Amino acid sequence: MKNKVKQGIKVRATAALAVHAVRDQGRSLDAALAALEGLDDPRDRSLVRELCYGVLRTLPRQEALAGALLHRPLKRADRDLEALILVGLYQLTDTRIPPHAAVAATVDAARTMGKAWAPALVNALLRRFQRERARLLEPPDPAPEVRWLFPRWLLEQLRTAWPQHWREIITASNARPPMTLRVNRLKTTRIQYAQQLSSAGLTARPSRDTTHGLTLERPVPTTELPGFADGLVSVQDAGAQLAAGLLDARPGECVLDACAAPGGKSAHILEHAGGDLELTALDVDPARLEQVRANLRRLSLSARIVQGDARAPGGAWTQAGAQAGAQTGAQTGAQTGAQAGYHRILLDAPCSATGVIRRHPDIKWLRRDTDLSALCGVQARMLDALWPLLVPGGTLLYATCSLLPAENEGQIRAFLRRRDDARARPLEEAWGIARPCGRQTLPQAGGPDGFYYALLEKSG
């Protein structure tokens, strides 16, 4: 029992440090959690994640509550303690943790921060919240950020871009995401795997608009998924699963997945084509390429994995495309440029990630409106750099997990103005919303995240 109490204290302290790293040091939540060690019990790690994700999902509300409870703001040097207060408040507002246990563990966590006055302050604030809960949770005129749990600049962007849908987008983005699986068609079928899930006591339904997707009734650790280690299934959002079908790579083709990490779309492209592809998985980050290797190895798939910058073609991945292009030219009698070589390219471009906020709530507080111009510049440079590597008659699928038009149809329209050998193929699909160029999914309860796709064809 004593050890359990100690672990409960460590859970709160760990969660507070991670929230502090995001809120005050600008680190991603994934990076902050990866840097924290010392919790061996999966249940403790799960609770840390729940507290961190929950605080960041509801951050403006918790900050407003803390501000109302404090007589004066804490000093900047005490922002780590303020993060712990936010963790304590979240437990009382949004979890089923017994209030006495939440308060006691959070107060004891304050004792680990080396501030003698901190435990008394945390105890007083949390107990005052309990006494005045009804009044504090219903302020007469909450600020837009507190009401919608979104930064004001992003609220304005979404209202402008999606006047008919912005409320639904925000509601879905503030909710917990579904856990969706992609069944590996090379090893089993969706029906067969659903039966395996059922035998393991897990309920799933087919994911709408996907051919191999299953959405679980409740999320579970991957260790509880039958055959996960053997590559029967992967975790991938339903919206992300649309990419492989749109790219529609055929057996024997040479394909480039630019910005491939962590490898989910690369694996799906290979599965879609029966594994018979010359696929190059490119990414600038060598550490994230290790994730690509691990994912492909688990699924018994192979690809050429190359570190490189999609803004600056060169080296092995450019040569691979050129060699394939030369072979294609010899087979067809066509004249292929020295650089052109890939039959299909997926550009899953770096973006604001505003369509996947429910999976990464730290995005709301790490992104700034000033980031958009730089991101759009990167996207444009990648499009311009990759286009010459595409064979005449080839297709490039441009994808983002953004909801902002400047990164999506605005980017594609500008590219089409720059290139007279490119055209956007109409996507007359049943899913999503048609845009001036391409198609968009919006975050939906139990459904896909927000993704944008545009399919570009190169004239022959």
Image (cartoon, rainbow, N blue to C red):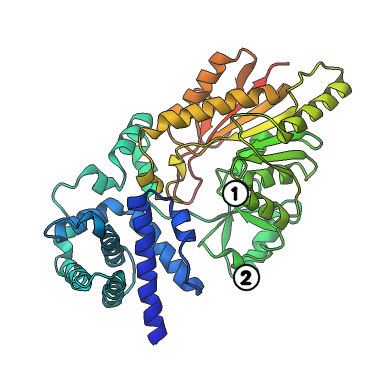
- SS state under label 1: helix
In the displayed structure, does residue 322 sit left or right of residue 434? right
Q: Quadrant of residue 21?
A: bottom left
Q: Earlier in the sequence, mark 1 or mark 2?
A: 2
Residue with the most extreme bottom position: 1
The N terminus sits in image quarter: bottom left
| Residue 103 x %, y % | 26, 73
Asked whether residue 426 appears in the rendered view, the answer is: no
Q: Which residue is mark 1?
A: 288
Within 10 Å of the Cα at label 1, are there few (<14), some (14-19), or many (20+) other Cα atoms?
Answer: some
What's the amino acid at mark 1?
Arg
Closest to the observer, 135 or 252:
252
Task: Report how far apart the C-alphas of labels 1 and 2 lie in the structure.
Answer: 32 Å
Q: Which residue is mark 2?
A: 200
Closest to the observer, 343 or 83:
83
Asked whether residue 66 appears in the rendered view, the answer is: yes
